[in-house]
Image: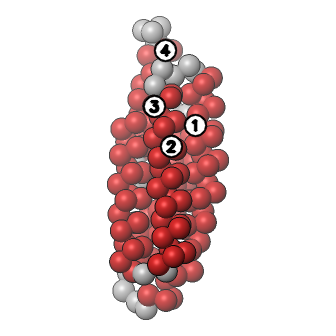
Amino acid sequence: MWKEKYKIGVPLVDQQHEELFKRVSEFIQTVQKKGIWTEKLDKVKETMAFMQEYVVVHFHDEEVYQEEVEYPERESHKQDHTQFKEAVGNYVNRFKEEGYSEELVQEFSGKLVAWLIMHVAAKDQKIGEYVDAQERGEL
């Protein structure tokens, strides 16, 4: 799933994005492969724990960087991060209440992939473009 074109030119952020894509890709492969559902649950739960912890660290690092470069859309970007954390939290609650059904996990995986690709490929790219323009003296 990771593509070099997703890089924004900030080593820490790019490394974190690559790790996110790797983990989500492994998660999707686990969920979609044939096999007994109960045998997949450990990987599903591991991914949920990772997402809850790692996105907090990643979003913090990305937001600090945006402050440092005075990225003009940082408040909107921060709101996107908050909404994503809330969405993950909602799924965590649903898993606690409803259990880790295959249908619910499939729903979560689809939303996870869509958000990750749309956010990194569209929104985060703007950060890189802004910094490039800054460095070229266009801003």
Rounded to the nearest whole Å, what is the CA distance between mark 2 and mark 4?
A: 24 Å
The residue carrying mark 1 is 62
Secondary element at tag 1: helix
Vertical side of 62 occupied by 72: above or below: above
Amino acid at circle 1:
Glu
Image mark for residue 103: none
Instruction: Kindly tell me whether residue 128 is visible in this rendering.
Output: no
Rounded to the nearest whole Å, what is the CA distance between mark 3 and mark 4?
A: 20 Å
- Do the CB atoms of the residues marked 3 and 4 lie less than 8 Å apart? no
Query: Of marks 2 and 1, which one's residue comes earlier in the chain?
Result: 1
Image coordinates of residue 68 in percent, x first then y, are 62, 23
Image coordinates of residue 6 in percent, x first then y, are 41, 42
Secondary element at tag 4: helix
**Quadrant position of the N terminus in the picture:** bottom left
The residue carrying mark 4 is 134
In the image shown, does 67 or 125 lie closer to the viewer?
67
Vertical side of 107 occupied by 124: above or below: above
Image coordinates of residue 26 in percent, x first then y, are 47, 68
Secondary element at tag 3: helix
Q: Could you tell whether 71 is left or right of 35 in the image?
A: right
- Do the CB atoms of the residues marked 2 and 1 lie less than 8 Å apart? yes
Q: Nearer the viewer, mark 3 or mark 4?
A: 3
Amino acid at circle 4:
Gln
Amino acid at circle 2:
His
Instruction: Kindly tell me whether residue 55 is visible in this rendering.
Output: yes
Query: For mark 1, does the 10 Å Cα neighbourhood hold few (<14), some (14 to 19), or many (20 or more) residues?
Result: many
Secondary element at tag 2: helix
The residue carrying mark 2 is 81
Query: Of marks 3 and 2, which one's residue comes earlier in the chain?
Result: 3
Rounded to the nearest whole Å, what is the CA distance between mark 2 and mark 1?
A: 10 Å
Query: Of marks 2 and 4, which one's residue comes earlier in the chain?
Result: 2
